[in-house]
Image (cartoon, helix red, strand yellow):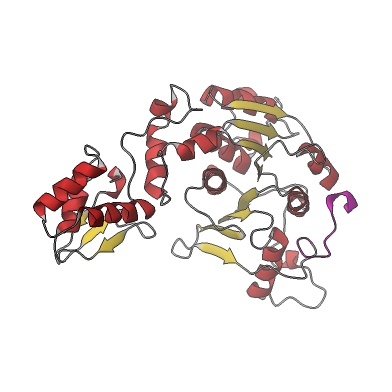
Amino acid sequence: MKPEHRPYRTVDGNVRIGSVIYGIGAEIADPDGWIWALTEAMDGTRTVAQIAAEVTGRHPVVEPGTVRSAIGELRAAGFVEDAAAPLPPGLGDRDPVRHARGVALLRWMDLSPRASPWQAQLRLRRARVVVLGVGGTGGAAAQLLVASGVGRLHVVDPDVVELSNLNRQMLYRETDIGSLKAEAAVAALRSLNSDVTVTGEPREIRGPADLARLLGYGEGVPYDLLVLGADRPPEIRRWANRVCLDLKLPWVEGGYRGPLITAGVHVPGDGPCWECLRAGEAERRDLRLAPGQDEEAASPRMPWNPASAVTAALSGTLVAHAALALLSGVPPMEPGFRYGINLMALGDPVLQRHPRRPACPACGPNRNRTRDLN
């Protein structure tokens, strides 16, 4: 049994397994007590044959085949791992030490049967990610991705570090003021984890064509995921949505609007796109705007974005969690939604899901391709 899924017996004799966390735990009826004997025997020191012998010895009415079948069901449910599984090829000598705690968490959340608990970490090691915008959200997300062992990370940002950035952009230090963010970010990220290949460039994205070139349009996409941390210009999410649809490239984005912190998870061809969600949410909210009135009137954009280290770090954390889930497969994440937290109402978490819109101008049958966007 996975250590994090250690079972226990309830007062009525059932077996609870997988912890008491919603989405993971399960309860098994055990009127004869042999399921409990089975879980006790599955402590990582016995083979399948030895486990079957242990259980049938204590409960002679149970057939060895029944025990093997039960082991198979527990494995299919994600509660079992092979304690003797070797480290998969592709991981280094430092990984078992550096990522031991992270793999334990992945193993805890992973309900897919795998040959090794390190397979999800191996997927991260092989992943290639570009982070566009390494300010508050993007900088925090980049730190978390590098710390988590993503294999290759490319950061893009045209700006320089300013004193006013340092209240929320914790990737930088006072000594970085005046330096290009891309260069300072590369240096900081490399010092965090030398096992990750980190590159960067001070590049400005002025339109969808610029973004398409960054992501390798027409040349074979060199990335597995786009992390969008930039919020300027205002159209950049629309550009990202159209370009990533064209390239079939998954992407995540996030940020903060005052105390409201959110992240979006998008996979072309799997669920609604960003524009579907935006249209669905506009209908749901019913802002009661006058005819012809823009929705900016209800939530105006300012020349500055009110933020703190807390809101920036939270948004970067939500984005990084979504990115790691898409890259590793743990936990499974159905794309096409936004989630988040409202610091003014912690008991009212944000979760936005809307169906795909058949007439969507971005992902519908009549959508324009990247080369048609100007």
Q: Where on the picture, by quarter, is residue 158? A: top right
Q: Residue at x 40, y 28 (%)?
A: 96
Q: Is residue 251 left or right of residue 112?
A: right
Nearest the eye: 64 or 55: 64
Q: Is residue 194 left or right of residue 346?
A: right
Give the vertical position of 66 relative to 289 (above or below). Answer: above
Q: Is residue 80 left or right of residue 256?
A: left
Q: Residue at x 38, y 30 (%)?
A: 86
Using the rendered image of the protein, determine whether residue 134 is visible from the camera's viewpoint: no
Is residue 71 found inside the magenta-colored segment of the image? no
Q: Is residue 172 left or right of residue 13?
A: right
Residue 217 spot, x, y in % from top left: 80, 41
Residue 216 spot, x, y in % from top left: 78, 38
Give the vertical position of 217 relative to 333 (above or below). Answer: above
Residue 133 spot, x, y in % from top left: 69, 39
Nearest the eye: 328 or 192: 328
Nearest the eye: 306 or 357: 357
Tell me the magenta residue range.
362-373
Nearest the eye: 259 or 87: 87
Magenta segment's dominant SS is loop
Q: Give the mark count.
A: 0
Residue 78 spot, x, y in % from top left: 37, 51
Give the vertical position of 247 relative to 353 (above or below). Answer: above
Using the rendered image of the protein, determine whether residue 28 is visible from the camera's viewpoint: yes
Q: Where on the picture, by quarter, is residue 66? A: bottom left
Is residue 370 found inside the magenta-colored segment of the image? yes
Give the vertical position of 269 relative to 314 (above or below). Answer: below
